[in-house]
Amino acid sequence: MQYLTRWFKRYFSDPEVAFLTVFLLIFFAVVLTMGDMLAPVLASLVIAYLLEGVVARFEVKGVPRLGAVLVVYLGFLMFVTLLLFVLMPQLSRQVTQLFQQIPAMITEGQRLLMQLPQSYPDFISPEQVQEIIGVIRQEIAELGQQVLSISFSSVVGVITVLVYLILMPLLVFFFLKDKQLIIDYLSGFLPRDRSMADAVWADMDRQIANYVRGKFWEIIIVWGVSSLTFSLMGLEYAVLLGVLVGLSVIIPYIGAAVVTFPVILIAWFQWGWSADFIYLTIAYFVIQILDGNVLVPLLFSEAVNLHPVAIIVAILVFGGLWGFWGVFFAIPLATLVQAVISAWPGGRLLDDLE
C-alpha cells in the first residue's frame, strides 16, 4: 500500500498530470456515451484535418486564409458530388447484380462440395459434406434476415444519410474557416501552465494530421489501381471490388486479409481454375505487396510510429468499444496513448524508495 501511495504521489501530484488525466477521462467518457450522436462531428473533424494541409499550402503561397478555405472547400464539394452521382450509381448497380448472382454461386459451390467425397474419400465423407452445406444454408438464411431487417429500416437510413450530407459539409466549412477561433475559445478553458498538454497536442497534431492525409491518399491510390487492374483483366464487379480493396487499407493487416476472400471467390466463380484466375490472383497480391512495402513506407515514413502488435490491439479494443468508428480511429487513439506515455513524467518508483 505504501508503494502504491508513493507511486500515486509521484505521478499525480503534478497539477499538469492531474489536468491531463481528468481531460482524457472526460474525453473517453463523452465518446463512449455519445459516440453515435457525435459521429458527424468526428467525421467532419477528420475531413477538416485532411483539407487543412491543402489550405496551409495555399497560405504559404500568400493566399489569404478565407480565400484558401473557399478554394479547397469548393474542390471538396466537387469531389463529394462526383462520388455521389458517378461512383454511387455504379456501386449500387454492381451490388444488385452480385446479389442476383449469389444463388447461382451457392449452387455451384454445393456441386463442387458434393464431388469432394468421390475425389478424396479418405479425407472427407458425404455426411461431412452435408453438414457443411447445412451450416452454409443456415448462415445464408441469417444473412437474408439481416438484409430484410435493413430494408425495413431503409427510411431511417435515408434520413440519416441526408442529415450527414447536410451537416457534415457545414461542419467541415466552419472547422476550416474558424479553426483559430475554435482553438482560442477552447484554450480559454485550459490552465495557463499546460506545457505537458501542449507537448501531447503538438505530437498528436503532427502525427494524426500526417496519418489522416496519408491514409486518404493510400485509399485513393489503392482503389484506383485495383479498379483499373480488375477492369482491364475483365473481372466482374471491378468497381465494387476496387472500392472494397481501397477501403480495406483503413484497417491495417486485417482489412487486406478479409477483402482477399471476395476478390478470389468472385474471380474463381467467373473463370474457375484457369489462366485468367491465376493472372488475376497474382496481380491482386502484387498490388497488396506494393501497398505494404512501397506505398505505406512512402506515405507514412514520419506519420505513425506504432508496433504492429500495438496497432492490432488498438483495432480490437477500440473496435469492440465503438464499432466502425472505433476501428476507423483506432490508430489515432493509439497515437494519443503513445503521446501521453511519451510526455508523462519519467522516473522509477524504486528511485524514491532508496
Image: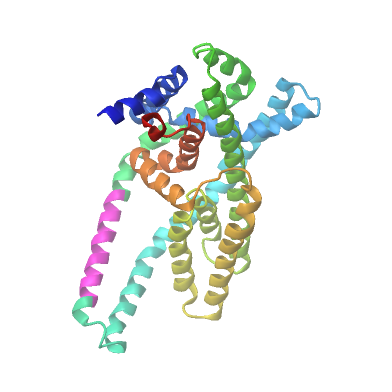
Q: In this view, does 3 lie to the left or right of 300?
A: left
Residues in magenta, as a range = 129-146
What is the quadrant of the N terminus in the image?
Answer: top left
| 66 or 269: nearer the viewer | 66
Q: Is residue 204 left or right of residue 323?
A: right
**Residue 208, quarter of picture:** top right
Q: Most prominent secondary structure in the magenta stretch?
A: helix
Above-or-below relation of 299 to 226? above
Residue visible at 62% across and 24% down? Answer: 176
- Magenta-drawn stretch contains 140: yes
User: In the image as oriented, which residue stretches furthest toward the left?
Assistant: 127
Give how far across and how far down residue 252 sits, in percent. Answer: 49, 52
Give how far across and how far down residue 192 sits, in percent. Answer: 54, 12
User: In the image as oriented, which residue stretches furthest toward the right?
Assistant: 62
**Residue 17, quarter of picture:** top left
| 31 or 234: nearer the viewer | 31
Give how far across and how far down residue 304 sits, in percent. Answer: 56, 43
- Magenta-drawn stretch contains 274: no
Q: In this view, does 181 lie to the left or right of 331?
A: right
How many numbered discs, if any?
0
| 23 or 157: nearer the viewer | 23
Q: Is residue 112 left or right of residue 131?
A: right
| Residue 85 visible in the snapshot | no
Residue visible at 38% across and 43% down? Answer: 319
What is the quadrant of the C terminus in the image?
Answer: top left
Above-or-below relation of 289 to 275? above
Residue visible at 42% across and 34% down? Answer: 348
Give how far across and how far down residue 342 sits, in percent. Answer: 51, 35
| 147 or 23: nearer the viewer | 23
Q: In the rendered view, how is the structure colored? A: rainbow
| Residue 319 visible in the snapshot | yes
